[in-house]
Image: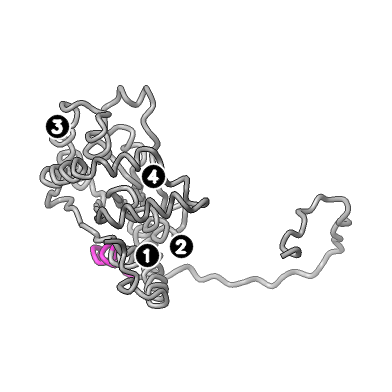
Amino acid sequence: MAEDKAATLPRKVYEKELLRLQTELVRLQEWVRAEGARLVVIFEGRDAAGKGGTIKRVAEHLNPRLARIAALPKPTERERTQWYFQRYVEHLPAAGEIVLFDRSWYNRAGVEHVMGYCTKEEHQLFLRQCPIFERMLVEDGILLRKYWFSVSDAVQQERFRRRLDDPVRRWKLSPMDLESITRWEAYSRAKDEMLVHTDISEAPWYVVESDDKRRARLNMIAHLLGTFPYHEVPPPVLELPERPASTGYQRPPRDLQTYVPDHAASL
């Protein structure tokens, strides 16, 4: 069945808790910066599972110089000849940085495998190498968290329908998204096989039930925060200086510059 509106978390409750969690995310960011830590968070799941909205809420109040989103396009011809993980390595964080992967190297275990964009041999090689690759990242000190957003077929279908009818979200819907409807079971089998090989103790998978987007966002952020022993880092002491007295500067006449028309006045 589609999303149960009655069971959806009330907006006021959601917004209050979201703001509290986002405040904690800012504290986490400052802890990462102060400790020189390197944090990678992977967001995976089916199309329309709520990954993008959650990433948006996670990053909303973070410093974009310290926390960035990596959403890689399809590989170039040159990248196709590289070691598969190579183009992702370029986006890993340096000390004090956070990288949020909006899809990741797990493309090979999902869409590439199901849609035939890689060979069976390439897929099997990925499943063998991925745990080794991730153990290397963790052994080198990277903090790696992996979240799988789980959505039911009925809810996914309803979200696709709403995107199709919404002009500001229509861009989110691609032919490949629609293709995923007819390959639901193939994606399910691919996900199950992926988890068998890559749900390792050094970098486990955490499944987020996401039929209710509000609950999913709060649950994921709360869980992420709970996986770190972070603490508040005292900010530097800042004092607003007194504005100095005028030295005679005069602003040029307004007619010498081109201003944006006041569209708001016509509303």
Tag of residue 61: 2
The residues bearing labels 2 and 3 have C-alpha atoms spaced at a distance of 39 Å
Q: Dot 4, crowdedness within 10 Å: few (<14), some or many (≥20)?
A: some
Q: Position of residue 170 (x, y in %)?
A: 47, 48
Secondary structure, mark 4, is strand
Which x, y percent locates residue 266? 75, 63
135 left or right of 237? left
Q: Earlier in the sequence, mark 1 or mark 2?
A: 1
Mark 2 residue crowding within 10 angstroms, few (<14) / some (14–19) / many (20+): some
- Compare marks 1 and 4 and give the one earlier in the sequence: 1
- Inspect the image, locate mark 4, and give the three-letter code of the amino acid beneath it: Ala
Sequence order check: which comes first, mark 2 or mark 3? 2
Q: Residues within 10 Å of mark 3 (few under 14, many from 20)?
A: few
User: Label 1: which residue?
Assistant: 25
The residue nearer to you, when weighing 247 against 213, is 213
Residue holding disc 3 = 124
Q: CA distance from mark 1 to mark 4?
A: 18 Å
Q: Which residue lies at the image location 17% right of the left edge and 41% below the top edge?
A: 190
Q: Name the residue nearer the viewer: 166 or 221.
A: 166
Residues shaded magenta: 220-231
Please tell me which of labels 3 and 1 falls first in the chain: 1
Indicate which label's residue lies in the foreground, 3 or 1: 3
Q: Amino acid at mark 2?
A: His
Q: Which mark is residue 70?
A: 4
Sequence-first disc among 2 and 4: 2
Q: CA distance from mark 3 to mark 4?
A: 25 Å
Tell me the quarter of the picture where residue 175 sits. top left
